[in-house]
Amino acid sequence: MKTYQTATIVLSLLFLANDVNTKSYNGDQVWRVYAESNNDIDAIHQLSHYGVHAEEIDLWQDPTLERPAHLLVPPLIADEIAASLANKGLNHDVMISNVGTLIEDEAKERQRNRIQSKKQARRRKRQTFEGMKDKIVGIYAEYDEIVTWMKELSTSLPHLVSLTTAEMTTSEGRSIYLMKIGRKRPYQKPAFWLDGGIHAREWVSPSSVVFVVSKLVEDYLKGYNTDLLDNLDWYILPVVNPDGYVFTHVEDRLWRKNRRYYASYNLTHPNEMDKICAGVDLNRNFPYQWEKAPEYGRYHCSIVFAGPYPASEAETQVVIGFINERKDDIKAFVSLHSYGQLVLTRWAHTSEERPADVNELDRVGRLVTDAISNTFNNNYTFGVPGSILYSYAGGSPDWAKGVANITYTYAMELRASIGSGFGFLLPENQTLDTGAEIFNGLKVVADQVISQHKHIVVNEEIPPTNPNIINRDSTSSSGQLCPMIVTTFTTLICGYLLR
Ligand SMILES: [Zn+2]
């Protein structure tokens, strides 16, 4: 037994050896930089987007008058940046003293958790729903692991989960997968769009999407929250930016954009026309108010490069294509990001204009924020990006609202909190709680959509597609029976009953 355990640990460590970032952040610090006026905010933007070291420093968090900027500073230029801040009259202090140490700590925690979760999965038997869940929920999974899990779910629960592959692939040739979750009905249901991982380094976003999928399915199999799959379809894209996500696992933990290379697209830096840089910020690439991107967003080496033209990127086109094919059904759109614990609504490109349904958007948005915050007494803030984060053009939520006309459109910045000192490097042991609080927020939107479309399904006869179908509302319904089945065969039996 001991030999077996040792072999398991060695194999796990060998497996994780591939998952080592080669870009070092040893000695890099993250500073809080305090802005007391709009001039201060402009000065921070000038330094981080146009300064001589703009490509070496990284503005993790934009400043507002209420909240300091978070600025990643490499050790070699730290003195110069500190002097530059002092010259501009800007105060700063250290939020993370060594980013490299935090990344190493994260890698160690992942090793420990993976060994544990794989053991747990083996105990439960891999091909049960619980076994699949143990392998993936509560960890920062790699892209291939997420794809494998999606395929296993759709194969083992075909009556609830299906998988579509986009025709277009990414610039590195990866496929993008869309899950559909919901009980099959012989009529149209309203639908909910949820995506994650559009920004590569925001790992808690895909992990929360995975949590939500797993909870939706598990609850349904146990007879809880059945309305969410009986009367709603979920279109779920766990990782919008697979190339970038993979890059954060193998090369650079803090990469943000996709991985497509651009050489000559450069309007603001004419002397660097031949410089080759990778990546478009996909959340600046959507074709709605794209042209309002700031000047630095036109520079192909900028961390927020909006692309050479709207929807230039395959990943953007895939999201647009998926939604356009289903836009008559999709009534809610939520895109998950990190960090800062915010629920964002209306327009990201402007704080001045308001959509016609602003009151309803805000009403539900506040309920969502309360539901998330009350789960663990962990406060999230609701508002317009221009007021509580920063304005930006070409984002997917603005496109979803402005072009696809989806009613309930929100973006969420998940954990860590601004004051936590973790930034993008949220400890893996917080992923379960993050997923749970976000699920509660999404449920508010889902319940709202279902209540508005209830008339479609009430009192409607459901023609049995299978002679074994059991009416879930009868006294012997599978919805009541399933919670009583406590063996590892729950999935099999419930799956059969619900088919
Ligand atoms: Zn983001």
Image: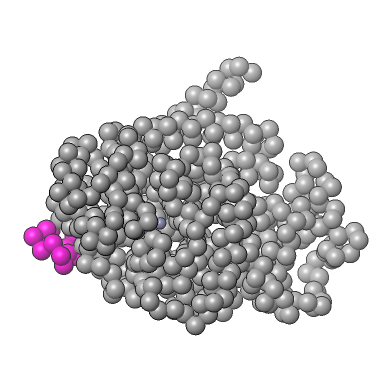
Closer to the camera in the image, 82 or 193: 82
Q: Quadrant of residue 257?
A: bottom left
- In this view of the protein, can residue 31 be seen by the observer? yes
Left or right position of 233 against 77: right
Left or right position of 463 against 2: right
User: Which quarter shows the N terminus?
Assistant: top right
Taking the magenta stretch, the answer to whether it contains residue 405 is no
Closer to the camera in the image, 483 or 378: 378
Closer to the camera in the image, 250 or 88: 88
Residue at the image position 15 percent from the left and 49 percent from the top: 87
Q: How is the image coloured?
A: one colour
Q: Position of residue 463 (x, y in %)?
A: 80, 74
Q: Return the residue found at the far right.
A: 475
- Residues in magenta, as a range: 261-274
Q: Position of residue 428 (x, y in %)?
A: 50, 39
Magenta-colored segment: predominant secondary structure: loop
Q: Position of residue 467 (x, y in %)?
A: 84, 66
* Residue 281 vertical placement versus 128 (above, below): below
Residue at the image position 81 percent from the left and 57 percent from the top: 479
Taking the magenta stretch, the answer to whether it contains residue 270 is yes
